[in-house]
Amino acid sequence: MKSITIDRELQFGPGLRVQRLTEAAFLLAALFMQDVRFAYVTFVLTVLQAMSPRWVPVARVVAWLVPFSGEHRIGDLYFDLRGSRGACAISVFVQAAGIGLVWAGHPTVGFVILTVPTASFLMAPTLGFCAGCWFYVLGRDWLVRRGWLRRSFDDCDDIAIDREGGPDQPELRA
């Protein structure tokens, strides 16, 4: 798939939601079975997304099998390149801390820490709230206020809203 096509599929299609639910399922399996090896799958998937938000194997398969062809609105928007990447980077550190604590012989604390990304992976596709994205935006805005980072146009240069004649979002309405 071309970049514009895959971005559109990830923005409005069900692929990334299924990816998040898959990640949550592996973390839930780790928590309920008290076996941290299930968390490794989610950890690898999250590391891939921290490197590039388009490296989402589950979402790409779903996008290929169930292409989005409907009409969409701004409220349907789910995928944001920088927000997803920043959220996954934060999640990698949280997951690494949880997995590391389990390895270090503190399984209770480690699994409790792993519940945080599990909750976020469940809330993002079901409620539309991504805790990692919220922390990323909060941190980015804090860095901008300190002058350590430059603000860009309306802080959303990842998502093209109201682009006249744009090939990826021809019918996006408020």
Image: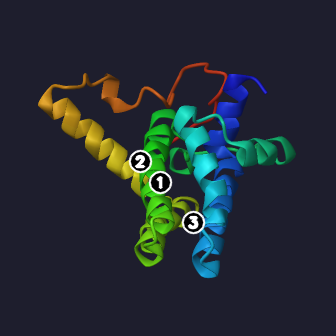
Which disc number belongs to residue 126? 3
Q: Nearer the viewer, residue 73 or 81?
A: 81
Spatial CA span between label 3 and label 2: 20 Å
**Which residue reaches farthest right?**
65
Which disc number belongs to residue 96? 1
Query: Which residue lies at the image location 66% right of the left edge and 34% below the top edge?
Result: 8
Could you classify mark 3 by the number of other residues whose Cα lies within 10 Å: few (under 14), some (14-19), or many (20 or more)?
few
Query: Which residue lies at the image location 71% right of the left edge and 32% below the top edge?
Result: 6
Q: Quadrant of residue 83?
A: top left
Residues marked 3 and 1 touching at CB (< 8 Å)? no
Q: Nearer the viewer, residue 149 or 78?
A: 149
* Above-or-below relation of 36 to 45: below
Kind of residue sitting beneath label 3 = Thr
Could you classify mark 1 by the number of other residues whose Cα lies within 10 Å: few (under 14), some (14-19), or many (20 or more)?
some
- The tag earlier along the polypeptide, 1 or 2, is 2
Query: Which residue lies at the image location 45% right of the left edge and 63% below the top edge?
Result: 98
Query: Is residue 99 among what the camera can see?
Result: yes
**Which residue reaches farthest left?**
146
- The tag earlier along the polypeptide, 3 or 2, is 2
User: Disc count in the image?
Assistant: 3
Query: Is residue 67 among what the camera can see?
Result: no
Query: Of helix, strand and loop, which one carries label 1?
Result: helix
